[in-house]
Image (tube, helix red, strand yellow):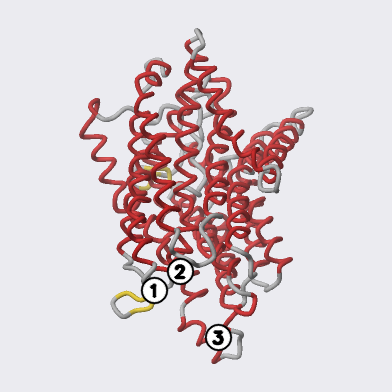
Amino acid sequence: MSSPSVPNPVPIETEPASPLHPQVFGHPKPLFTLFFAEMWERFSYYGMRSLLQLFMVLAVAQGGLGFSVSKAALIYGTYTMSVYMMSIPGGTIADSLIGARAAVLVGGFVIACGHFCMAFPSDTTFFLGLLLVIIGTGLLKPNISAMVGHLYPPGDVRRDAGFSIFYMGINVGSFFGTIITGFLAKHSWFKAWLERHGFNPDHSWHWAFGAAGVGMVLGLAVFLLFGQGLKQVGAPPARTPGAWKKPVYVLLGTLGVWFIAWLSDRPGFTWLRSIFLLVPIGLMVWFGLSKDTETRRLGAVFFFFIGAFVFWALFEQAGSSLSLFADRFTETHVLGFEFPSPWYQSVNPLCVMILAPFFALLWTKLGLRQPSSPMKFTIGLVLLALGFVLMVPAAKLAIEGRVSPLWLIGLYFLQTCGELCLSPVGLSTFTKLSPSKYVGAMLGVWFLAAAFGNKFAGVLASAFGEGDASHLDSFFGQQAIAVFIIAGIFFALVPWVRRRMGGVQ
């Protein structure tokens, strides 16, 4: 599960080598501290995210916020966009002022406070909690990933394997986070337990939000108790006059882009949404037609930006439209056992853990015969669209009643295959194609692709409807057709993009 996790920064070769660390299984011992810290952070993030849309549309009388699907989806999209977007100033603050280690500690503390705010039932604490999680994740997520990179000296061939181990922690945390919070929020056994002990069963959602906070506290505990080897990793940079200026400028620029995205949801300003796709297309063509080799590579960069944007716009509906489909139109009892609808969101990280080794083996076996990076992006989009095609007959069957879980499981399987074609390739290719002096800036561009994709996932999900399944076949089908068309254009552009890449694989 990449979405929502912020992509792992690939440290550039000019970074200083880190001190030697004790080795465990051939890797620096602090890697496993970061693995478990990140696992618990993702437990908290995905555990809460799996409930967000469902809680917002739940009737007030049942303990929810009573929002319409459209309003809740737009809030969801803005929230997930903001998490990614704040990673840009979060990384800059660490690089310029406080260092990665301090950013992780402060960010984790703020995230925990956010989840615990949401444990109290009120609109104010709910939105305050979301804001704190956004700020905290912006500080923690890019910097804990950067610390992984700092564990390996430049040119260390183990670095990719180290990030693969770290990436597995993301999916382990995501899997268990959705299982545990989904059980606390929705399972009838836990609601009955609350009632027997004098608690309001309608407040089960807030127990789940609190559990996400406990997960983040456990992540901080791991980081502090077992992070002795990390004291010199991500240390504060040397203070220089005016070091504060860059983070301030980056933060103001990020907030400016965020404001445009927020404004695009307001009546009369929805036309602003087109900017987020037309500008990257224009930049792809503009840079791609340059006579300078390095500049032409930026044309390829924005090809990958557009592909990531489109991919996440459908993929990240796991927590919005697909969450609603699971809750309202899919069986919630499997083999006689209650199966809370948020549990369906655990299928993706489970598939990643199962399939990632097979994809790694496949690319290794193919060697030079494996598809190029732009072709892998195209394949990823096709698989994504096929998942939504699978939902068309499921939606038609849902008119008659709840459908088999196999429809959603098939969707998540196809999406995971698409993710494994696209996500591991994206950031690595970004950094290879970017001019060396702009690698940091291009990491920010990658974050923006994920941010905009998450925002548009909310925009698209706002058309899901309030409970009638009769239009859902067209809802899923139209998105599938749109992505097939984009994938066809991508396929036609593969030779053009490979020429712009200038030999970079």
Q: Residue furthest toward the right?
A: 241
Badge 2 marks a residue whose secondary structure is helix
Give the residue type at disc 1.
Answer: Thr
Q: Which residue is mark 2?
A: 327
Number of on-image labels: 3
In the rendered image, is residue 87 in sight?
yes
Residue 252: image quadrant is top right
Badge 1 marks a residue whose secondary structure is loop
Q: Assess disc 1: are there few (<14), some (14-19) or many (≥20) residues with their C-alpha within 10 Å of its C-alpha.
A: many
In the rendered image, is residue 235 in sight?
no
Q: Measuring from the top left, give residue 484's x and y in whole percent.
A: 37, 39
Q: Are marks 2 and 1 in contact (CB under 8 Å)?
A: yes
Q: Residue furthest toward the front?
A: 470
Residue pictured at 39% horizontal, 42% vertical? 481
State whether residue 56 is above or below residue 416.
below
Q: Which residue is mark 3?
A: 194
Q: Earlier in the sequence, mark 2 or mark 1?
A: 2
Give the residue type at disc 3.
Answer: Leu
State whether residue 466 is above or below residue 39.
below
> Relative to 235, is 381 on the left or the right?
left
- Using the image, tell me which numbered label, if any, was put on residue 332: 1
Q: Earlier in the sequence, mark 1 or mark 3?
A: 3
